[in-house]
Amino acid sequence: MIRCLIVDDNASFLDAATSVLQHDEVTVVGTARTIEQALRQAGELQPDVILVDVMLGDESGLGLARRLFESGSTATVVLISTHAEADLAELIDETPAAGFMPKSQLSAAAVHRLVSERRGR
C-alpha cells in the first residue's frame, strides 16, 4: 500500500483525487492546500509519494518540490498540473521531482508506476 499526500489549492480536485486514488492500493494520508501545510504534513505523515500541483494559487509547487527535497523528505515527489508537460518541461527539469503527471491522467496505477520507477533507479 502506497501512502500519499496530495497538495493542491483546489478543494474540489483534492476530493476527486482522493476518491480516485483510494480505490486501488493507494492510501491518501493527507491533503494540503498551501506550502506550509504540505511541509508540516510531509514531516508528520511520512508519505511514500507527494503529488504537488505546479501552481498553488499564489505559491509555487515547483518551489515546494525543492523545499521537500532540501528538508530531507524521502517521499517520491510527483508534479501534477492541468497544463501539458511540454509547456512546463524546462521548469520541471529544474526540480528534484521524480516525474510529472497530467491531472487528467491521475490514477493509482500511474502513481504506482512512478514510485516503482524511482525505486528502480
Image (spheres, grey):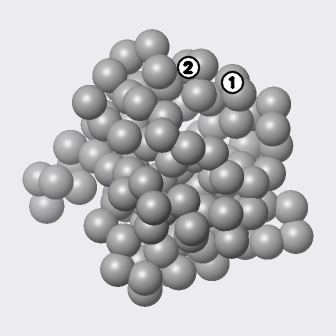
Which quarter of the picture shows residue 34?
Answer: bottom right
Classify residue 88 as left or right of residue 41.
right
Q: Residue furthest top?
A: 23
How would you rate the neighbour count of disc 2 (Cα within 10 Å): few for under 14, some for 14-19, many for 20 or more?
Answer: some
What is the number of callouts on the image?
2
Seen as rendered, the residue at the extreme bottom is 70
Identified at 47% across, 74% down, the residue is 68
What label does residue 62 carry, if any?
A: none
Q: Is residue 93 visible?
A: no
| Residue 117 x %, y % | 22, 48
Residue extending farthest left = 120
Residue hosting label 1 = 16
Secondary element at tag 2 = helix
Badge 1 density bin: few <14, some 14–19, many ≥20, Cα 10 Å: few
Tag 1 near tag 2, CB within 8 Å:
yes
Image quadrant where one finds the C terminus: bottom left
With respect to residue 67, does 39 lie above or below? above
Q: Does residue 5 lie above or below 108 as drawn?
A: below
Separation (CA) of disc 1 from disc 2? 6 Å
Residue type marked 2: Val
Residue at image location 79% in from the left, 72% down from the top: 59
Q: Report whether residue 3 is seen.
A: yes
Which one is nearer the viewer's eye here, 100 or 107? Answer: 107
Badge 1 element: helix
Q: Which residue is mark 2?
A: 20
Compared across the picture, whether 6 is left or right of 37 comes to left
Residue extending farthest to the front is 44
Relative to 37, residue 59 above or below: below
Whole-percent x and y of residue 70?
43, 86
The residue at 38%/51% (across/down) is: 47
Closest to the observer: 46 or 118? 46
Q: Nearer the viewer, residue 55 or 41?
A: 41
